[in-house]
Amino acid sequence: MTAPIVLIIDHSPTQALRLQIALEEEGCEVKVAGTPEAALEILRNEEMDLAVVDFSLPGMQGDELCRMIRRNANTRNLPLMLLTDAENDEVLRPGLESGVDDALPKSASLESLLFRLKALLEKSRQKTRIPDCNSIFGKGRLLVVDDSPTYREFLAQQLTDGGYSVVVADGAESARAKLAHSEFDVILIDLVMPVVDGIQLCRELDQVRLTMRNPFSILMLTAHEGKDEMTRGLDAGADDFIGKSSEPVVLRARISALLRRKFFQEENLRISRELEKKELETLRARDEREAALARAILAEKLEVTSRRLREAQIQLIHSEKMASLGQLVAGIAHELNNPLAFVSSNVENISGWLQAIEPEVTPHLSAPSLHKWVKSQRRLADATQGIERMAELILKLRTFSRLDEGEFKVVDIHEGLDSALVLLRHRVKARMFVTKDFCSDGLLGCLPGPLNQVFLNLISNALDAIGEEGTVTLTTQREEWHFVIQVTDTGPGIPVELIDRVFDPFFTTKAVGQGMGLGLSISYSIVQAHRGSIEPHRSPTGGTAFEVRLPLNLETLLRDPVEGTKIQ
């Protein structure tokens, strides 16, 4: 089995060496890069199994570098560990925003860091190289225009050693020819040249790049570093100005800054184009939907009466609502079940391991360390409780949607009521109470999915009715021929003159924007399809009680060819 390859990106040689030695002792092959440019060059040519990125890097912060790595198709799945100077809850904030897999403060112990790195290395990742996806990591392409052969070759060598791809030209004519056949990121122009000087060539190139999709940057070079020369160069269109007497490291830093600026401009342009494309697609889709809706409305007007059109609209809204709910729950169940099982298993294993070594470890711990040990055990217990609550929520979501129970089935009605309560739990305030009085046997043959929506609508309306303070009571009762569900609230109640209209489509007593008046109408249709009844009453507490009566022999009734409403 080949050794995993780890890339350490850190400008501190001491810190990088410390981590390198520790990883090599663990059997890893280690590459070290002191700058973002060096790291991108390594990633362009080699495949890594893990990268450890320091947040504080010269010229670019670590989270910014992580975003660049994530944007490249060949490295977007590379596990990333970000080391920050922050502490406590601030540690993960920059990392999560930049897409890293984990983040730790630099003050963390080496053992803790190695443990987290091993966990990242153990992740199974399939590496698939995608051709032509290294534009972000590609070498900077430079064109050096200078009439001095000695300085031209010296500068080309310095820049080549700095990791750039360099092409040279001895004057304006040669530069035009090379620019006609190749693309460059930065063009370095000598201010003083025979025939066509640097100022004239700079103006010419500045006009040329206005027509380019990905324009180059211009860096003016001069042996005369006065203010007047700098002003002339910048006025001619140069992006930066530097003296020939500057150290090569300064020149490379200026070029790196221009390349970064160019990259971000390209990224902004790309994002702008993508947004424009999506906007056009959205407008096109909206136009298509509007045209389809217009055709549908016209067809309905030609074929059915106004009343049937309204009923069709209600059924359409109900179908879309249930379909959206099904997609939502399917996504949640799929996305949460696997990672939840992974977390649950790991927490259980860690808890078991700690308990197993507790007799050996705790006698040797100091008082502060023992306190941390006990605190860690409590945190694991808290995590276990949170995982159990999450599992319960997923179960209730599946119970509510009944994604796998679209046909007639015998279910526990009490589970459906409980699942609706879980979904509405966030709406129960401090002075709001929900009580339950269920019978011993809640089994009933029905169509679970639609019936659960009835429960959700009734409980939601009851919570709206009591406002910020009151009680909602759920009761069930099994009679000789019917199963009875009652939802009672302590709100102001429905006015007598309106009680006969509550099931009318689009009728609502709520404020404008707080309800469409379809919940009770849809609930009425669902209960009718179950050959049952739903009726509102004034409760003894002054509020409203909605009573749903469902036949116990629904399966027999559904086989009966009696005409009735079908559930869509």
Image: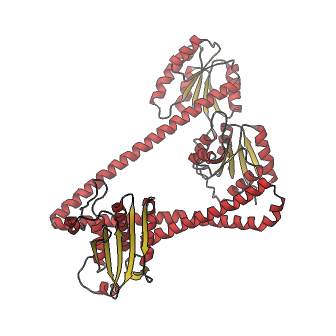
Q: Is residue 157 left or right of residue 313?
A: right
Q: Quadrant of residue 382?
A: bottom right
Quadrant (top left/top right/bottom left/bottom right) for the N terminus: bottom right
Is 315 placed left or right of 4 in the picture?
A: left
| Residue 407 appears in the rendering | no
Q: How far from the left and from the top, in percent, is residue 330?
A: 46, 66
Q: Please state if 141 lies on the left or on the right of 408 as rendered.
A: right
Q: Position of residue 400 (x, y in %)?
A: 43, 70
Quadrant housing the C terminus: bottom left
Which image quadrant for residue 359? Answer: bottom right
As drawn, 192 above or below 41: above
Q: Looking at the picture, tell me which residue is in the foreground, 89 or 290.
A: 89
Q: Residue at x 72, y 49 (%)?
A: 6
287 and 528: which is toward the camera: 528
The residue lying toward the viewer, choosing from 560 and 476, is 476
Indicate the position of residue 37 as horizontal and vertical percent values: 66, 37
Residue appearing at x 55%, y 28% in the figure: 217
Residue drawn at (55%, 32%), measured in percent from left and top? Answer: 261
Out of 108 and 22, give the one closest to the viewer: 108
Eyeballing the image, is 335 above or below 144?
A: below
Above or below residue 517? Residue 22 is above
The scheme the figure's colours follow is secondary structure
